Image (cartoon, rainbow, N blue to C red):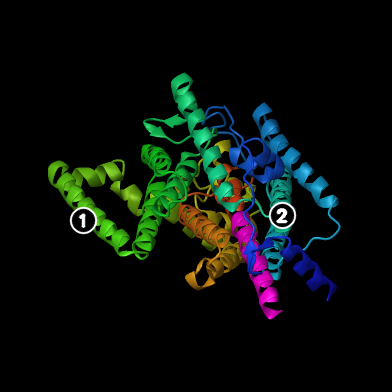
Amino acid sequence: MRGQNRHMKQASQLVNMNEHGIPEARSPRRLSFLKFPLRYPIFLLAFGPPLLRPMDKYAGVDTSQAHFDAWSIFQVGWLLLIALRAILRLSAVRSILLPKQTRSILKYALFLGLTFLASVAYSPGRIISAEYSICYFLTLICVLEFLVNAYRNPPDWMQCLFYLRLISLLLCAVILLCILIKPSLVLKGFRVLGGSVAPVDIICPVIAIISAYSFLHALESRVRSVLFFLVGLAGTLLSQSRGAEIPLLIVLAIICIGSAKTSKRSAYLFISGFMAFILLVGAIVGTVGAGRIWLVFNRGNTESFVEGSGRVGSAKFVIQYCMTHPLGMGYVTGLRSIGKLRPDLGSHMNLSHMGGADNSYMEALADSGWLGLALYLLVIGETVALGWHFAKKHSLETLAPDREVHHVIRCALLLLFYCLVNGLDASEYVLPLRAEFYVQNIILAIILGASASMLIASRTRYAFSAK
């Protein structure tokens, strides 16, 4: 009963009464550029931070064993400072109140971290595995602190998405400077990959998706949305990464189809745009030739595309190994150490590509076995289910702030969908100290926090209506 009273007291702080005595959700005030990360420091993790070192600095080095440089110390120190601040703020909280669904997801994430930590016992690089396990828990602490803070005093959720986009834009500016000053930091041939400065295959799609959603739902200035969308789209195309281009195209299609369902005008615009796109593609294919386009798309190697650039062979190897070793190979270092004995797998033997599966799901399987993969899928699946519950139309109330949170959840789910599809092409979503890992955790935190805010608002309205 006391717990319920505390929840109701907290929920009542999130609403105001209008002149008719009906509860209205309170719209939080937006914070300045500098105050926002001080209030919610987890967003500072989205910076990575940028590491200004060549992409091939550790080529040929055994990344399953301990080695570091000044940039590694800076990277770990960045996470450590943010996590220590989160610990101090959590220690000042007398009681942590979170919805049952959120607590369940956090428990699965905790158990996943414990499987990573347990794998240290049989890891070929125990020091590295232990260090990355600690980094995983530090990131989880940052997520917990954000959820507790947001549950007690919800932020402007739309600002959370825009701030994540702003950080991505700043990282794009850093990449542009590196191209002008020292291209080897971010370029691989004619491909703009971002290297250890900032991975283009995550920051540019984030910019494009948030901007496209904001444009179609009029959540900000349309001129700004179009400008930022073009920046994100151009960066994704310059990466020449199929693993980024294909999921971005799918997400943009989902956004357009969802918008087309809202009104006849949107439906006409979508149909007209789709027809124009088909005509444009047909004209390009007729002019250039389908064969040449196919070769360019596959970067001149069709066989590599069919084999997933070696990912199919790597996945078969991981599955076969885990069939006889269900606990996996050891967190982060196992696949690197065992995979180097199989040069046919095409592993990337350098520090900026720690992990060798080039697939987040196979990486989780290789790191901590079938239990680790199951827990990772549970964390993702439970979060998607919770967010989808509040993203559905029948969950949307008539209050304006609720509509905004509703849009935030839907946009965050689209971002998460991109991460899940792009995870088929990259291992970094399960590896700490990688921008992809941080961005996915921030997106998960936004979904969980925004869902909790809508849950509080619904409880409050129910309580008032019962009276």
Q: CA distance from mark 1 to mark 2?
A: 46 Å
**Crowd rating for badge 1 (residues with CA inside 10 Å; few <14, some 14–19, many 20+):** few
The residue carrying mark 1 is 275
**Crowd rating for badge 2 (residues with CA inside 10 Å; few <14, some 14–19, many 20+):** some
Q: Nearer the viewer, residue 115 or 173?
A: 173
Quadrant in the picture for residue 321 = bottom right
Q: Residues at badges 1 and 2 in contact (C-beta under 8 Å)? A: no
445 sits to left or right of 177: right
In the image, the segment drawn in magenta is 444-467
The image shows residue 39 at horizontal and vertical percentages of: 71, 43
- Chief secondary structure of the magenta portion: helix
Identify the residue at horizontal 23%, vertical 51% (top origin).
277
Residue 382 covered by magenta stretch: no
Quadrant containing the C terminus is bottom right
The kind of residue on which mark 1 rests is Met
Q: Nearer the viewer, residue 36 or 84?
A: 36
Quadrant in the picture for residue 94 = bottom right
The residue carrying mark 2 is 153
* Image vertical order of residue 52 relative to residue 256, above or below: above
* Image vertical order of residue 455 relative to residue 250, above or below: below
Residue 459 covered by magenta stretch: yes
As drawn, the residue found furthest toward the left would be 286
Quadrant containing the N terminus is bottom right
50 sits to left or right of 302: right
